[in-house]
Amino acid sequence: MPADTASDPAGTQRLDKWLWAARFFKTRPLAVEAINGGKVQVDGQRVKPGRAVRPGTRLTIHKGELEWQVEVQGIAKQRRPAAEAALLYTEDEASRRKRQELVRERREAGHAPAPEHGRPTKRDRRRIGEFTGRGR
């Protein structure tokens, strides 16, 4: 493992920090929210964000329709590029196949990713005006 990802003396790290460093979540608050919402389990148990993880710990991570079953392989002091973050865990082969199959099915069915919620487009504003009777 690279020198930058050396583990701390105890060989453990907070779960929320590890999920962020392994790039499962973009920010630590998002990781904390997922953990508190029961979307992340350690060895099949709901846990708190401060739970210590060490190499060998098994995690189940749910994000939307996708699910990862991974085993922690390393601890990172800081967030690194995705290629290095992928070295922090190994995913079960069954989990990987299931996730890839789901993505392939969605792609073939023509399901685009959910649009980002934000301001309505010009077309949306016109349709809202027609519906509410204000767009005359």
Image (tube, grey):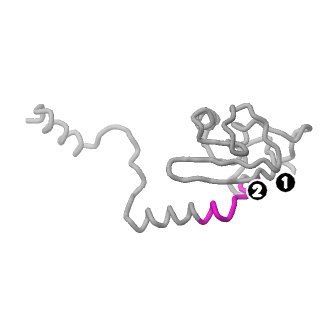
Taking 77 as reference, is 129 left or right?
left
Q: Nearer the viewer, mark 2 or mark 1?
A: 2
Q: Quadrant of residue 128?
A: top left
Look at 69% across and 45% down and name the residue there. Answer: 44
Q: Position of residue 60 (x, y in %)?
A: 65, 48
Looking at the picture, tell me which residue is in the foreground, 20 or 62: 62
Q: Position of residue 43 (x, y in %)?
A: 73, 45
Q: Main secondary structure of the magenta part?
A: helix
Report helix, strand or loop for mark 2: helix
**Disc 1 crowd, CA 10 A, few/some/many (<14, 14-19, 20+):** few
The tag earlier along the polypeptide, 2 or 1, is 1
Residue 64, image x, y percentages: 50, 48
Mark 2–mark 1 contact, CB under 8 Å?
yes
- Residue 56 placement, left or right of 95: right
Residue 10 lies, in percent from the top left, at 90, 37
Q: Which residues fall within the magenta stretch?
A: 86-97
Label 1 element class: loop
| Label at residue 2 | 1
Amino acid beneath label 2: Leu
Residue depicted at x 63% and y 36%: 35
96 within the magenta span = yes
Identity of the residue furthest to the right in this view: 9
**Vertical position of residue 113 compared to residue 11: above or below:** below
Name the residue nearer the viewer: 44 or 7: 44
- The extreme left residue here reads 136
Please state which amino acid type lies under the numbered disc 1.
Answer: Pro
Marks 2 and 1, how far apart at CA: 10 Å
Residue under pointer 2: 87
The residue furthest front is 44
Quarter of the figure that contains the N terminus: bottom right
| Residue at 69 percent of width and 60 percent of height | 92
Residue in view at x 66 percent, y 54 percent: 69
